[in-house]
Image (spheres, coloured by chain):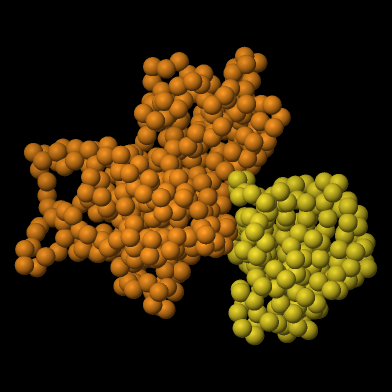
Chain colours: A orange, B yellow
């Protein structure tokens, strides 16, 4: 084991280095993370042999990475919050042209209100854009999932881009002890980039991304849908190979101490670590609770989820994004759809927005509410679980007519 | 599991100290540490804090520390800047303070810590590094309360700063470690 102390941003960079990315484009100003400056350092000192292109916006950053990949090299960029929002138009170009970029997204809230801090609202805004989305629990997972993502995305059965989502600050700036695989082992696991569909060959030029008539558009989308359907099989295959090399099991989703649980909480990202910690604490006190951690949010593993949640009558779902105007947040909506026809009471919790810490107390409060519902002691839960009582008077403006 | 909180002012290297401390316990003592820094609008002189969790096993908890076992204050003036460094402490919590002033100690004595350790880390940093940045010197102080050895701290400091700067910073830590006093 070659242990290093790395924060989430450095772990993402370590993975890109191990994958030997050949073109890096980044917009080096807020809301960029230290990912772009660490990559710049490694290109400058020759550790990464890549062309580093500084661009004037995230829109251009993803345009450069996407087109570089179309030329036939492994290309990289990274983003966060409003940067991802600015990329939006190109996000569709990347997936629609079947360009298998792996992009770390440091999850931060979208303005306004202006925020620098953690939530999943940025990535959730892009959830239906044809990218795979993986949410990481800890820094080790940032490294492992990024490495695995190259294999999954570049496989001919998938050929789609992915966002490896890491919680702003709670992962991006949290230093943790992680095991980094050797370059030789990753050379063997990932290998060089091999273009499989569209690429530049001057002796045999091709024209891509032309205007697609209604006669073909649906079928092109259908191809993307089929590629999404293939992800789970491809994921399992490469996760097994990765486990042989590193000894670490990377899962599409994980059931934690759910076998004999009275109720479970479903969540994404770094809060799953805190939730597991709370599960251990509550179990030591005789309260049987469990956690279901979703790593792969896109494609959504609805069959596996349905199977895992089948035994439970009361289920909590924690969204770290507001899901404004929806019946619930994006994770709750997916879970509810996956459980369609099963007799489960699925409670929706929203919290951890704009950097608010998801504490042990918050998670324990959720579990206690779920246990009370399960045992018939209570009918209600607190949907906005960590909202202050003064919410409606905060920054109140008196209108003078 | 030991929960730790470092307090100081922007520019004093509070976050860097937490990183070096985490490397010392994780890479040289076989334990697991995670740092969870509380970033705000970066500003020199503003109060800052960072949380660190140390355990024998990989740490699952990923949140700030609210009930610290150890509090280290790198600048004695943080309590005059609206920061409650005793927030969430329990009857076993200990304090490590960067000061040798009796009048400061008497203020901190009222906060309810079980034990208070103190040393003038800023003065030692001035002497050994030539700058009053107390992060390395105060790492010597935290090594004085048994959570990590001074050898591991010195190794981590030398690895972080490299070369001559590493030697000077390690010496500052060693000196602080020797001069640390229990109130």
- Residue A102 locus on image (x, y percent): 34, 55
| Residue A94 visible here | no
Q: Residue at x 34, y 63 (%)?
A: A187
Q: Where, quadrant-wise, is the C terminus of chain A in this rendering?
A: top right
Residue at (65, 82) in percent of width and height: B165
Report the residue at 51% width, 46% height from top.
A137
Q: Is residue B161 above or below residue A115?
A: below
Front-lying residue, B115 or A4: A4
Give A245 or A296, whichever is nearer the viewer. A245
Report the number of discs.
0
* Percent x, y of residue A175: 58, 59
> In this rendering, would A56 be left or right of A363?
left
- Whether A357 is drawn above or below B142: the answer is above
A160 sits to left or right of B90: left
Q: Residue furthest left?
A: A203
Furthest residue in direction front, as rendered: A244
Q: Residue at x 41, y 25 (%)?
A: A307
**Whole-percent x and y of residue A22?**
30, 68
Position of residue B6 measured from the top left corner of the image (x, y, whole percent)? 72, 60
Q: Is residue A257 visible?
A: yes
């Amino acid at each position: 084991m070659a242990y290093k102390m790395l924060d989430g941003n450095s772990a993402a960079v370590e993975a890109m280095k191990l994958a030997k990315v050949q073109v890096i484009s980044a917009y080096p100003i807020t809301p960029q993370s230290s990912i772009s400056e660490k990559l710049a350092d490694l290109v400058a000192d020759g550790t990464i042999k890549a062309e580093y292109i500084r661009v004037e916006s995230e829109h251009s950053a993803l345009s450069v990475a996407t087109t570089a990949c179309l030329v036939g090299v492994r290309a990289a960029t990274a983003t966060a919050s409003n940067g991802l929002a600015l990329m939006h138009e190109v996000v569709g170009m990347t997936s629609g042209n079947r360009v298998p970029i792996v992009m770390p997204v440091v999850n931060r809230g979208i303005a306004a209100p202006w925020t620098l801090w953690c939530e999943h609202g940025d990535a959730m805004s892009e959830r239906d854009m044809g990218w795979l989305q993986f949410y990481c629990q800890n820094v080790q997972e940032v490294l492992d999932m990024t490495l695995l993502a190259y294999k999954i995305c570049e496989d001919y059965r998938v050929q789609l881009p992915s966002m490896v989502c890491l919680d702003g600050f709670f992962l991006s700036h949290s230093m943790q002890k992680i095991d980094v695989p050797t370059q030789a082992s990753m050379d063997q696991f990932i290998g060089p980039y091999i273009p499989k569909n569209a690429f530049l060959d001057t002796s045999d030029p091709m024209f891509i991304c032309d205007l697609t008539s209604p006669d073909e558009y649906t079928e092109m989308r259908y191809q993307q849908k089929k590629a999404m359907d293939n992800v789970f099989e491809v994921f399992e295959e490469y996760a097994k190979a990765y486990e042989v090399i590193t000894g670490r099991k990377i899962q599409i989703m994980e059931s934690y101490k759910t076998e004999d649980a009275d109720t479970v909480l479903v969540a994404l990202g770094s809060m799953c670590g805190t939730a597991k910690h709370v599960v251990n604490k509550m179990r030591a006190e005789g309260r049987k609770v469990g956690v279901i951690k979703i790593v792969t949010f896109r494609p959504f593993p609805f069959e596996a989820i349905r199977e895992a949640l089948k035994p439970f009558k009361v289920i909590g779902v924690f969204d770290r994004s507001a899901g404004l105007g929806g019946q619930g947040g994006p994770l709750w909506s997916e879970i509810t759809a996956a459980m369609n026809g099963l007799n489960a009471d699925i409670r929706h919790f929203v919290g951890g927005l704009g950097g608010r810490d998801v504490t042990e107390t918050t998670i324990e409060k959720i579990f206690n509410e779920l246990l009370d519902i399960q045992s018939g002691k209570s009918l209600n839960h607190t949907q906005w679980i960590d909202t202050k009582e003064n919410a409606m008077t905060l920054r109140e403006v008196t209108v003078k007519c | 599991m030991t929960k730790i909180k470092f307090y100081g002012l922007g520019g004093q290297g509070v976050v860097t100290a937490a990183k070096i401390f985490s490397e010392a316990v994780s890479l040289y003592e076989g334990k697991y540490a995670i740092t969870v820094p509380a970033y705000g609008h970066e500003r020199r002189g503003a109060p800052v804090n960072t949380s660190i969790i140390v355990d024998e096993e990989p740490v699952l908890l990923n949140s700030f520390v609210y009930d610290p076992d150890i509090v280290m204050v790198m600048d004695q003036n943080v309590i005059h800047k609206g920061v409650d460094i005793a927030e969430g402490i329990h009857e076993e919590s200990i304090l490590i303070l960067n000061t040798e002033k009796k009048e400061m100690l008497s203020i901190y004595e009222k906060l309810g810590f079980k034990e208070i350790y103190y040393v003038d880390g800023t003065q030692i940093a001035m002497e050994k590094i030539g700058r009053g940045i107390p992060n390395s010197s105060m790492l010597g102080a935290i090594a004085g309360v048994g959570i990590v050895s001074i050898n591991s701290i010195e190794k981590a400091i030398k690895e972080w700063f490299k070369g001559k700067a590493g030697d000077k910073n390690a010496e500052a830590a060693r000196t602080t470690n020797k001069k640390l006093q229990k109130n």
